[in-house]
Image (cartoon, grey):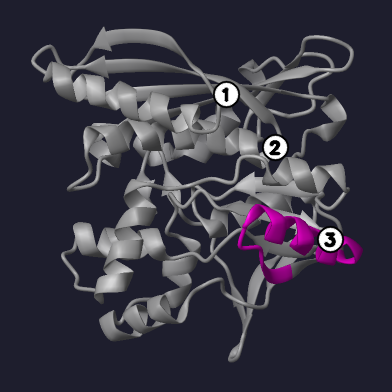
Amino acid sequence: MLRTGEMGERNFLAKISSLVNIPRGAKLGFDDDASDIPISDKTNLVINVDTFVRKTDWLPEMTPAQVGRKTAVMALSDLAAKGVKPIATMLSLCVPEDYEVEDANELVRGFSQYGLKSSIPYLGGDVGMCDDVVLTGVALGTAAPEDIVPRNGAKEGDVIAVTGHFGLTSVAFEILIKRQKAKPELHKDALAAAFRPEIDIDFVAALKDIEAVTASMDSSDGLGITLHTIAKLSKCGIIIENLPITSEIEFFCRNKKLSTMKMVMQGGEEFLLVLSIPPEKYDDALDVARKKKVNLVRIGYVTKGNQVTWASKEGSVPIPFAGYDSFKEWN
């Protein structure tokens, strides 16, 4: 009998896709970051759910408050990628019967406070008992259907851009799990990225207002998987000209004999946005980014075909469809 770990998350999702019912008037499909339901002629309710499990997701040295905070980021990040205004969050918390009450309180406090700093209220949710610590965050938002940005809108010639440099969480995993050493400033930045990730909640919405985005997706499963997903759903290819990596991380990779490509493309858990932007609108997008203090980085462009490649100095290198799989962890 086939096991879920053998099948993998994405094959399982394909298997159950026929069981999903998409409401008439919904903008997003089953294969997008979030789901939406029309609640009036002009407004859709957009919903996302994400789960944090102690066994697979809780990094060494991470506090309960940071876990709660990260769960909120996980839930809200997908709404941000759709250009949706979040209106509330909810949380389901399951813990063992002997779990410390103060730690459970800190999990909820961290979740609640992240939303409150952006005026997103935490409404409550559910609690239960299980053998592990499991947090399931729900984020709700609203948007006009035409303002919701899908994954599948990239067009030939569009600029591919991201909202920051990749690889910090990969460095954090090396530090925390494999006990590698890094320079003090990189050590600090890497742990901050892993423990206290940030998201740009209203950036995509601002780009949509000036028609400066055609597709958007968050990169929590890894940049490589994100690029492949946008390319597949948009029926296009993507060429990456510049790996979005800092010189400090490049030095770390060379020093530790680590693959730069793998650190950038398969790290995951970074919650940066990956965007396709019409070339004639890119300067306008940069203006919005400057005003909102978002680090918008141009990394490539959309092309014909169905390949996702890196135009390295040594020639064209295929970018693998690999990253985080909920049933297999990292692959």
Residue kind at label 3, given as amino acid type: Asp
Q: Earlier in the sequence, mark 2 or mark 3?
A: 2
Instruction: Give the labeled residue for mark 2.
Output: 82
297 in magenta:
yes
The magenta segment is 279-300
Front residue of this view, candidates 285 and 45? 285
The residues bearing labels 3 and 1 have C-alpha atoms spaced at a distance of 41 Å
Q: Main secondary structure of the magenta part?
A: helix
Q: Earlier in the sequence, mark 2 or mark 1?
A: 1
112 in magenta:
no
Residue at left offset 63%, top offset 29% = 34
Q: Residues within 10 Å of mark 1 (few under 14, many from 20)?
A: few
Q: Is residue 102 visible?
A: yes
User: Residue 28 vs residue 172: left or right?
Assistant: right
Q: Residues within 10 Å of mark 3 (few under 14, many from 20)?
A: some
Q: Which mark is residue 16?
A: 1
Label 2: which secondary element? loop
Q: Earlier in the sequence, mark 3 or mark 1?
A: 1
Front residue of this view, candidates 307 and 78? 78
Q: Is residue 198 above or below residue 183?
A: above
Residue 126 location in percent, x, y? 37, 8
Viewer-nearest of discs 2 and 3: 3
**Residue lying at the far bottom of the rendered structure:** 314
The residues bearing labels 2 and 3 have C-alpha atoms spaced at a distance of 19 Å
Residue 138 location in percent, x, y? 50, 21
Residue at left offset 49%, top offset 48% = 221
Residue kind at label 2, given as amino acid type: Lys
Residue kind at label 1, given as amino acid type: Ile
